[in-house]
Image (cartoon, rainbow, N blue to C red):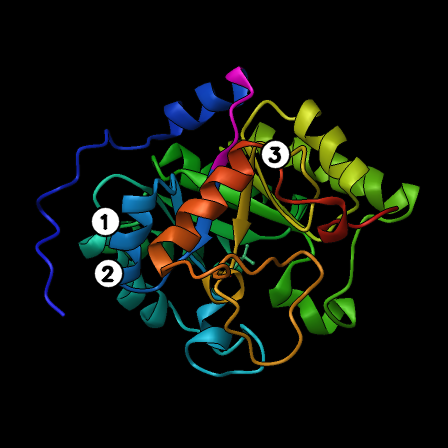
Amino acid sequence: MYTDTSVNQPRRPITLSKLRKMKQAGEKFTCLTCYDATFTYAMNQAGVETILVGDSLGMVVQGQDSTLPVTIDDMCYHTAAVKRGNGHAFILADMPFMSYSTPNQALENAAKLMQAGAHMVKLEGGAWLADTVKLLSERGIPVCAHLGLTPQAVHKLGGYKVQGQDQTQAELIHQESLALVEAGADILLYECIPSALGKTLTEAMPVPVIGIGAGAATDGQVLVMHDMLGVNIGRPARFVKNFLTDGRTIEQAFAAYVAAVKDGSFPAPEHTFDA
Ligand code: KIV
């Protein structure tokens, strides 16, 4: 289907400074993963502020059993598609497995994603990434650091498990987050951590915090698009809610997600984890 995406995009572009202001004002923002132009357009129409071109595309688009096989070329292809469908959302793009194992390699690959249309790159990891974040930040590349459950480390973690459930782990995530913010991280994303820890970190961090399975207190929420449309291979994770219900269209499902995040009804306690 051809759609002229240059028209009918009245909203002002979402920028990093807008997201910072939303945090300061206590206004929740939304994020969904997306991998193509048409769904991006529909998300724009529904008011989704930020779009993540996630390496989850390895699983939900390519049918891989993890995100590890995804390449930088795959990420650039999908980032460019999202950019073409986008009017105003802020686009984050994942740096795939082993594309940022040294600072210089990260710089080279982050540049490719930015040139493909990303407004920010996302990397998974803790304090070991500080030099990389510093280098990217100094070169003008905004960075989101993804902590907690980091799917690229699934084999090291022993599965897709909740992280930060004991005091030592929670303190480590807190200290690593501070180190990454100090190095220049502009956004933090936490996956699968107890909701109390999500709240503590959101209050402690000076930058916007996005959560997935991190409780209701984070500044922003993200879900994988396929999950929130109820299209899953296998059993969905606890933090997932299907919004394509009650006879909604896909665009109405996106809008219902936006409304639920804004009014605080998503995530509900049944979508969150305890310590
Ligand atoms: O790749 C992805 O979709 C992600 C989300 C799970 C946050 O990183």
At label 3, the amino acid type is: Gly
Mark 2 is on which residue type? Ala
- For ligand 1, tell me if the residue under mark 1 lies within 8 Å: no
State the separation of the CA atoms marked 3 and 1: 26 Å
Tell whether position 174 is magenta. Answer: no
The secondary element bearing badge 1 is classed as: loop
Residue at image coords 72%, 38%: 198
Q: Position of residue 240 (x, y in %)?
A: 62, 59
C-alpha distance separating marks 3 and 2: 29 Å
Answer whether labels 1 and 2 touch (C-beta < 8 Å). yes
- Residue 37's label in the rendered image is 2
Direction from residue 29 to residue 153 in the image, left or right: right
Going from N to C along the chain, the mark reached first, 3 or 1, is 1
Residue type at mark 1: give it: Asn
Q: Which residues are magenta?
A: 25-29
Could you give the CA–CA distance between mark 1 and mark 2, rounded to whole angstroms?
A: 7 Å
Choose mark 3 or mark 2, whichever is in front: 3
Mark 1 crowdedness (10 Å alpha carbons): few <14, some 14-19, many ≥20: many
> Which residue lies most toward the right here?
167
The quadrant of the image that shows the N terminus is: bottom left
Q: How many marks?
A: 3
Please give the name of the residue rendered at 90% of the width and 43% of the height, measured from the top-left corner: 168
Q: Earlier in the sequence, mark 3 or mark 2?
A: 2
User: Which residue is tagged 3?
Assistant: 264
